[in-house]
Image (cartoon, rainbow, N blue to C red):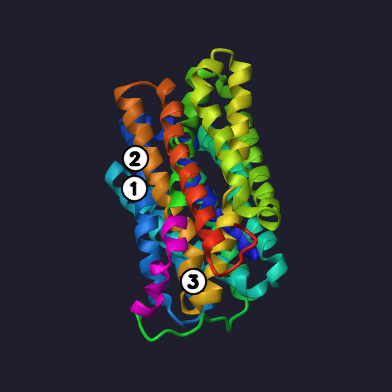
Amino acid sequence: MVLIAIAFVLGCSEYIIVGILDNLAKQFQIGISQVGYLVTGFALVYAISTPLITLAIGKKSLYKALLILLSIFIVGNLLTAVANSYIILAVSRLITATSSGACIAVALAFANFIAPIKKRGWLVSWVFSGFSIASVFGVPFGTWISKNYGWRYSFYAIILVSIIILFFSILLLPKNIHQQASKNFKEQLRIFGDRRIQIGMFLPMFNLAGIYVFYTYLQPILSHILLVKENFLTLTLFLYGLMALISNQLSGKISSSSGLKKMPEIYIGQFLLLVLFPFLAVVPFIGMIVVMLLGVSMYLLNSPIQIFFLTVAEADYPQSLILASSLNSIFANFGIALGSATGGIVTEYFSLNKIAPIGSLYVLIALVLTLILERIGKLSTHKFNMI
């Protein structure tokens, strides 16, 4: 439960910007696309800092590392809550991003050590579900707080929850877990010489790039294209988050059965939904169905690719287990940065209506990568259930 709670509060902090774009734009007198770039910056720093921190952890206690990272996370959110300029806001988000990536990597490493092999897919899907629960409850609740009390109080709520989670982490998590020692950073980096990793790490990147072109600007899409009234915006975001939670649970089931073999079919469906969205959104009810289906497809890759990375590392690179556990979140955040930046450019120079079809191009790349990875897996000497 503690690991899920950690993912939940990390998700709340990362995703809350999506629900308060308009509020921040008004507060700092900037355009919506500039606020959207906060998502891009957060994701880039998250992705770049995570491998550096996980490499630095080495054979040190995962327990101590997690507590330090959670403390930095709390400080970052406190700075966000009191920010009085866009620059301070941006810097505070970068501090939060620095701790967030390594924090979830360590949490996933805990899950890998704690769970028996047959239960790993299930536990990993539940840890990732913490992010979906953040979408279901955290983001809509944060949007409601922002609307009624001001956006700063959304972050004060995140800080309060984080302190409670830190307290229970101190009490409940095992204190003697370490990854296998390695002689140096170079030995840990050997995992990047594996072709399965070289192809696989770009899969979560393009997977989320396709969705985040759309998701980063979900609030204005709902308001201006699907004409959702402000009173129903929180409810709609809640329903979308619920679909994302279902997505994570389905991800665990896919991982336990067919794994990555199922993803090409999913990507074809996702591609069609994004391409057709501008035409289907002419009827708001049908457009809303498409939005919810995209929510269901959002995180289906999570468990299959995470278990794939962990299995490769455990079999051939045990000294790189924490680094392997971070690959999904690292490259997913590169994807979030790419997708949100693309969405910002499309919004600024074209229109909201063009966002979804542009996102479909990234989904097409994810489809091709999945097919390549499946072929490599079949030729591999190792037999993995997820390929």
Q: Are marks 2 and 1 in contact (CB under 8 Å)?
A: yes
In the picture of the structure, the residue carrying the numbered disc 2 is 37
* Label 3 close to label 1 by CB (< 8 Å): no
Would you place residue 300 above or below residue 199 in this image? above
Q: Could you say which is closer to the camera, residue 297 or residue 85?
A: 297
Against 284, is 313 above or below?
below
- Can residue 51 be seen here? The reply is yes
- Disc 1 designates what residue? 41
Label annotation for residue 207: none
Q: CA distance from mark 3 to mark 1?
A: 24 Å
The type of residue carrying mark 1 is: Gly
> In what element is the residue under mark 1?
helix
Q: Is residue 3 magenta?
A: no
Choose top left, top right, bottom left or bottom right for residue 28: top left
Q: Circle 2 sits in a helix, a strand or a loop, which is it?
A: helix
Q: In the rendered image, which residue does mark 3 sit on?
A: 322
